């Protein structure tokens, strides 16, 4: 079984409901180990949109990384994800952050997620559920990566999952 950390975000519709449904869909085919609290975060790249709710989930799965990506996209589709604006509003966003210590740079999939070390809304919930997890490229814990991050956007606790 592979240890995988997935970032989940939503800023359209019932944000919390979207996240809970995504977690439930993940439970259909994966072993959910831990879900972080939900965090409210302001959008980063495309600013003209509502605040996000974000969390990170730790799963164990037999899926290969590429098959997991296909499964995550199927969940996004089930929840009405539309890809109209790059980094724009979305009902749900599911990103593979880490897949064991795998380093993969493929056309459709990069692991670890290429910008997770720049994203407070990813690092804060990651630190909550796995503070000592080592980034396989930077050879630093997620706690160290968070401590090195400059003030990038508001991220605050919304509620425990």
Image (cartoon, helix red, strand yellow):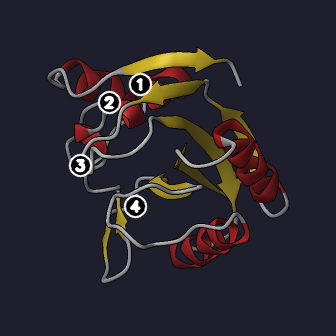
Between residue 13 and residue 63, name the one nearer to us. Answer: 13
Q: Compared with residue 122, is residue 158 higher up or lower down, i.e. above or below?
A: above
**Dot 3 corresponds to which residue?**
45
Disc nearer the start of the sequence (3/1): 3
Instruction: Please tell me whether mark 4 sits on a helix, a strand or a loop.
Output: loop
Residue at mark 4: 102
Separation (CA) of disc 4 from disc 3? 27 Å
148 over 52 or under it: above or below: above
Residue 117 point in image, percent of width and height: 25, 40
The first of marks 2 and 3 along the sequence is 3
Badge 2: few (under 14), some or many (20 or more) residues near its Cα, within 10 Å?
A: many
Residue 109 image label: none
Q: Nearer the viewer, mark 2 or mark 4?
A: 2
Q: Which mark is residue 124?
A: 1
**SS for tag 3?**
loop
**Cα separation between marks 2 and 4:** 22 Å
- CB within 8 Å, label 2 to label 3: no
Identify the residue under disc 2: 120
Q: Are marks 1 and 2 in contact (CB under 8 Å)?
A: yes
Q: Earlier in the sequence, mark 2 or mark 4?
A: 4
Quarter of the image where one finds residue 80: bottom right
């Amino acid at each position: 079984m592979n240890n995988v950390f997935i970032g989940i975000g939503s800023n359209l519709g019932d944000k919390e409901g979207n996240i809970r449904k995504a977690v439930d869909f993940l439970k259909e085919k994966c072993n959910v180990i831990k879900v972080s609290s939900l965090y409210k975060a302001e959008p980063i790249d495309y600013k003209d949109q509502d605040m996000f709710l974000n969390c990170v989930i730790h799963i164990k799965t037999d899926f290969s990384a590429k098959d997991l990506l296909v499964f995550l996209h199927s969940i996004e589709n089930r929840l009405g994800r539309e890809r109209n604006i790059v980094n724009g509003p979305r009902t749900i966003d599911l990103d593979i952050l880490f897949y064991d210590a795998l380093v993969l740079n493929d056309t459709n999939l990069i692991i670890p997620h290429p910008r997770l070390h720049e994203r407070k809304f990813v690092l804060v919930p990651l630190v909550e559920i796995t503070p000592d997890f080592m980034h396989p490229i930077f050879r630093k814990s997620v706690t160290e990566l968070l401590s090195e991050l400059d003030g990038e956007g508001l991220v605050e606790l919304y509620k425990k999952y």
